Amino acid sequence: GENVEQHPSTLSVQEGDSAVIKCTYSDSASNYFPWYKQELGKRPQLIIDIRSNVGEKKDQRIAVTLNKTAKHFSLHITETQPEDSAVYFCAPMDSNYQLIWGAGTKLIIKP
Amino acid sequence: EPEVTQTPSHQVTQMGQEVILRCVPISNHLYFYWYRQILGQKVEFLVSFYNNEISEKSEIFDDQFSVERPDGSNFTLKIRSTKLEDSAMYFCASSAQVYEQYFGPGTRLTVT
């Protein structure tokens, strides 16, 4: 089955700086790559996703890049703000159309 | 903006009891899911449901679990005989296509 790894497990950045979280996966048939944000005690919230026919997608301060050859995709957040503090999960979809979740990255924005 | 809703927000039950967790998916969505998240851990897939039948289920979703869409709006998860290790947050999700799954606020299940 799909093996998903996320790095780093914790990321602390100064407010205004950029943050990058990387996700590697094993199933070469994966073709859908979402990122979810989860604030403490809240639901996972879909923040951006990408299909395998594109290499990059951007939505304001958030972007996702995909390298299918290397089987990894990354979340980029620019100009970080306090409200970006949360746990971020990658969840690539496997060949059975199941989202396989990474272990999460705790993003801390320092004022 | 339409959202997935879940009831109750918190359920406390004794070991061996049956529980039913309820979800109302977004109205024009066709795919429905249950996930669970043990405190501080990653989200785990339980089951997906489409066209009134289970399309995929994980190893966690054993004979103790069942799902049902009893009417045009509700989607339920039943655990027949709860165990201590079933304590977790249970999330329902729905999607119009197989992608872009939107999650409900969750039901925190505590088994004592």
Image: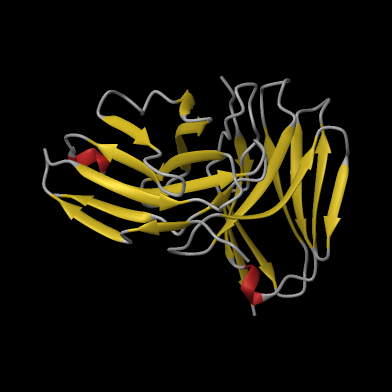
- State which quadrant residue A60 falls in: bottom right
Which residue corresponds to the image point at 54% horizontal and 54% vertical from the top-left?
A44
Above or below B77: residue A88: below
Q: Position of residue A19 (x, y in %)?
A: 73, 59
Depth check: give the residue in front, B107 or A79.
B107
Furthest-front residue in this view: B71
Depth check: give the residue in front, A43 or B18.
B18
Above or below A100: residue B3: below
Q: How many labels does the image show?
A: 0
Q: Position of residue B5 (x, y in %)?
A: 45, 59
Q: Is residue A36 left or right of residue B77?
A: right
- State which quadrant residue A106 falls in: bottom right
Which residue corresponds to the image point at 65% horizontal and 68% vertical from the top-left?
A84
Q: Position of residue A8 (x, y in %)?
A: 62, 48
The quarter in which the N terminus of chain B is drawn is: bottom right
Above or below B3: residue A23: above
Depth check: give the residue in front, A111 or A64.
A64
Which residue corresponds to the image point at 33% horizontal and 61% vertical from the top-left?
B9
Depth check: give the residue in front, B86 or A104.
B86
